[in-house]
Protein backbone atom coordinates (compact mmCIF):
# COMPACT_ATOMS: atom_id res chain seq x y z
CA UNK A 1 0.00 0.00 0.00
CA UNK A 2 1.34 3.42 -0.91
CA UNK A 3 2.06 5.84 1.88
CA UNK A 4 -0.65 8.47 1.38
CA UNK A 5 1.09 10.88 3.76
CA UNK A 6 4.01 10.98 1.35
CA UNK A 7 2.14 12.25 -1.71
CA UNK A 8 4.35 14.71 -3.56
CA UNK A 9 3.69 16.67 -6.73
CA UNK A 10 6.33 18.07 -9.04
CA UNK A 11 6.21 21.76 -8.17
CA UNK A 12 7.50 24.62 -10.33
CA UNK A 13 10.50 25.13 -8.03
CA UNK A 14 11.38 21.44 -8.38
CA UNK A 15 11.13 21.70 -12.17
CA UNK A 16 13.41 24.75 -12.19
CA UNK A 17 15.93 23.04 -9.93
CA UNK A 18 16.06 19.91 -12.10
CA UNK A 19 16.32 21.82 -15.37
CA UNK A 20 18.97 24.23 -14.01
CA UNK A 21 21.26 21.32 -13.25
CA UNK A 22 24.21 20.60 -15.52
CA UNK A 23 22.71 17.09 -15.92
CA UNK A 24 18.90 17.27 -15.65
CA UNK A 25 18.50 13.49 -16.07
CA UNK A 26 20.77 12.77 -13.10
CA UNK A 27 19.11 15.58 -11.13
CA UNK A 28 15.69 14.05 -11.83
CA UNK A 29 16.85 10.64 -10.58
CA UNK A 30 18.23 12.23 -7.42
CA UNK A 31 15.02 14.23 -6.92
CA UNK A 32 12.85 11.10 -7.17
CA UNK A 33 15.14 9.00 -4.98
CA UNK A 34 15.14 11.65 -2.24
CA UNK A 35 11.42 12.45 -2.51
CA UNK A 36 9.93 9.18 -1.28
CA UNK A 37 11.28 6.98 1.52
CA UNK A 38 9.99 3.87 -0.22
CA UNK A 39 11.78 4.57 -3.52
CA UNK A 40 14.68 2.18 -2.86
CA UNK A 41 16.16 2.23 -6.38
CA UNK A 42 15.57 4.81 -9.11
CA UNK A 43 17.13 4.67 -12.55
CA UNK A 44 16.72 5.87 -16.10
CA UNK A 45 17.08 3.40 -18.94
CA UNK A 46 17.69 4.87 -22.40
CA UNK A 47 16.43 3.01 -25.44
CA UNK A 48 19.11 1.89 -27.87
CA UNK A 49 17.24 0.13 -30.68
CA UNK A 50 16.03 -3.15 -29.12
CA UNK A 51 17.82 -2.66 -25.80
CA UNK A 52 17.43 -0.48 -22.73
CA UNK A 53 20.76 0.89 -21.49
CA UNK A 54 21.17 2.01 -17.89
CA UNK A 55 21.82 5.70 -17.44
CA UNK A 56 21.91 7.59 -14.14
CA UNK A 57 20.60 5.72 -11.10
CA UNK A 58 20.47 5.93 -7.31
CA UNK A 59 20.47 2.92 -5.05
CA UNK A 60 22.43 -0.32 -4.96
CA UNK A 61 24.41 -1.28 -8.08
CA UNK A 62 22.58 -3.47 -10.57
CA UNK A 63 23.95 -6.10 -12.94
CA UNK A 64 21.23 -5.11 -15.43
CA UNK A 65 23.03 -2.39 -17.36
CA UNK A 66 21.56 -3.49 -20.71
CA UNK A 67 18.11 -5.09 -20.95
CA UNK A 68 16.68 -6.40 -24.24
CA UNK A 69 13.15 -5.04 -24.73
CA UNK A 70 11.83 -8.59 -24.96
CA UNK A 71 12.75 -9.20 -21.28
CA UNK A 72 11.62 -8.02 -17.88
CA UNK A 73 9.12 -5.48 -16.65
CA UNK A 74 11.21 -2.72 -18.23
CA UNK A 75 11.00 -4.41 -21.61
CA UNK A 76 7.27 -5.01 -21.14
CA UNK A 77 6.66 -1.28 -20.60
CA UNK A 78 8.24 -0.58 -24.00
CA UNK A 79 6.47 -3.45 -25.77
CA UNK A 80 3.09 -2.62 -24.24
CA UNK A 81 3.68 1.14 -24.56
CA UNK A 82 2.35 1.89 -21.09
CA UNK A 83 3.15 2.51 -17.43
CA UNK A 84 3.54 -0.72 -15.47
CA UNK A 85 2.84 -0.57 -11.73
CA UNK A 86 3.56 -4.00 -10.30
CA UNK A 87 2.62 -4.51 -6.64
CA UNK A 88 4.10 -8.02 -6.35
CA UNK A 89 7.19 -8.51 -8.50
CA UNK A 90 7.73 -12.08 -7.34
CA UNK A 91 4.30 -13.04 -8.66
CA UNK A 92 5.14 -11.95 -12.21
CA UNK A 93 7.21 -14.23 -14.46
CA UNK A 94 8.55 -11.21 -16.38
CA UNK A 95 10.39 -9.84 -13.34
CA UNK A 96 14.20 -9.80 -13.55
CA UNK A 97 15.51 -9.66 -9.99
CA UNK A 98 18.07 -6.97 -9.23
CA UNK A 99 17.66 -7.45 -5.50
CA UNK A 100 16.06 -10.11 -3.33
CA UNK A 101 14.50 -7.34 -1.23
CA UNK A 102 12.51 -5.75 -4.09
CA UNK A 103 8.76 -6.22 -3.69
CA UNK A 104 7.23 -3.77 -6.16
CA UNK A 105 8.25 -1.94 -9.32
CA UNK A 106 7.03 1.10 -11.23
CA UNK A 107 8.17 1.62 -14.83
CA UNK A 108 7.18 4.81 -16.65
CA UNK A 109 8.05 5.25 -20.34
CA UNK A 110 9.72 8.45 -21.49
CA UNK A 111 8.12 9.65 -24.69
CA UNK A 112 9.00 12.10 -27.44
CA UNK A 113 5.96 12.24 -29.67
CA UNK A 114 4.95 8.63 -30.36
CA UNK A 115 8.43 7.24 -29.68
CA UNK A 116 9.51 5.69 -26.38
CA UNK A 117 13.09 6.87 -25.90
CA UNK A 118 13.62 5.49 -22.42
CA UNK A 119 11.98 4.94 -19.09
CA UNK A 120 12.19 5.65 -15.41
CA UNK A 121 12.36 2.46 -13.35
CA UNK A 122 11.69 2.52 -9.60
CA UNK A 123 11.94 -0.41 -7.20
CA UNK A 124 10.58 -0.55 -3.66
CA UNK A 125 11.18 -3.00 -0.86
CA UNK A 126 7.51 -2.56 0.13
CA UNK A 127 4.77 -4.61 -1.51
CA UNK A 128 2.22 -2.58 -3.50
CA UNK A 129 4.21 0.58 -2.78
CA UNK A 130 3.15 2.71 -5.72
CA UNK A 131 -0.12 4.61 -6.11
CA UNK A 132 -1.63 6.56 -9.00
CA UNK A 133 -0.04 9.65 -7.44
CA UNK A 134 3.37 8.01 -7.80
CA UNK A 135 2.57 7.22 -11.44
CA UNK A 136 1.60 10.86 -12.05
CA UNK A 137 4.69 12.23 -10.30
CA UNK A 138 7.07 9.99 -12.24
CA UNK A 139 5.22 10.64 -15.52
CA UNK A 140 5.60 14.40 -14.92
CA UNK A 141 9.34 13.95 -14.31
CA UNK A 142 9.63 11.79 -17.45
CA UNK A 143 7.96 14.50 -19.53
CA UNK A 144 10.24 17.14 -18.02
CA UNK A 145 13.50 15.35 -18.88
CA UNK A 146 12.51 13.74 -22.21
CA UNK A 147 14.49 16.18 -24.35
CA UNK A 148 17.63 15.57 -22.30
CA UNK A 149 17.21 11.79 -22.39
CA UNK A 150 16.99 12.04 -26.19
CA UNK A 151 20.45 13.67 -26.23
CA UNK A 152 22.06 10.94 -24.13
CA UNK A 153 24.22 8.58 -26.17
CA UNK A 154 24.06 4.98 -24.89
CA UNK A 155 26.96 3.78 -27.04
Image: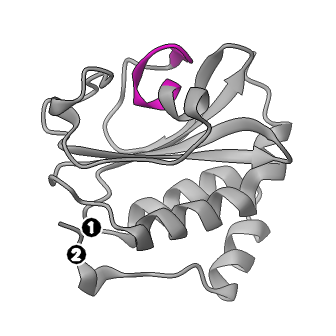
Q: Secondary structure at mark 2?
A: loop
Picture quadrant of residue 59: top left
> Does the magenta portion include 67?
yes
Image position of 126 with respect to 43: above or below: below
> Does the magenta portion include 84?
no
Q: Is residue 54 visible?
A: no
Residue occupying the far front of the picture: 80
Picture quadrant of residue 11: bottom right
Q: Which residue is mark 2?
A: 3
Distance between the Cα atoms at labels 1 and 2? 9 Å
Task: Tell me the residue at 41%/59% (across/down).
Answer: 33
Q: Which residue is mark 1?
A: 37
Viewed as shown, does residue 19 lie left or right of 142?
right
Which segment did they paint magenta?
Answer: 66-75
Q: Which mark is residue 52?
A: none
Viewed as shown, does residue 42 lie left or right of 22?
left
Number of residues whose C-alpha sits closer than 10 Å to that of mark 2, classed few (under 14), some (14–19) or many (20 or more) = few
Residue 147 position in % (x across, y down):
84, 51
Task: Give the foreground label among 1 and 2.
Answer: 2
Q: Secondary structure at mark 1?
A: loop
Viewed as shown, does residue 56 lie left or right of 147?
left
Viewed as shown, does residue 43 lie left or right of 25?
left
Image position of 82 with respect to 14: above or below: above
Residue 140 position in % (x across, y down):
63, 67
Q: Is residue 132 visible?
A: yes
Residue 13 position in % (x across, y down):
67, 87
Residues tagged 1 and 2 counted as in contact (Cβ below 8 A) = yes
Amino acid sequence: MALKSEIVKLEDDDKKSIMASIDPVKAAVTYLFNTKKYYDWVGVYIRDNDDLVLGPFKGPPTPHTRIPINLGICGAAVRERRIINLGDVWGDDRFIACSTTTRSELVVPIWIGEEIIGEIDIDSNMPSAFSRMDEELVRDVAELIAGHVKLWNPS
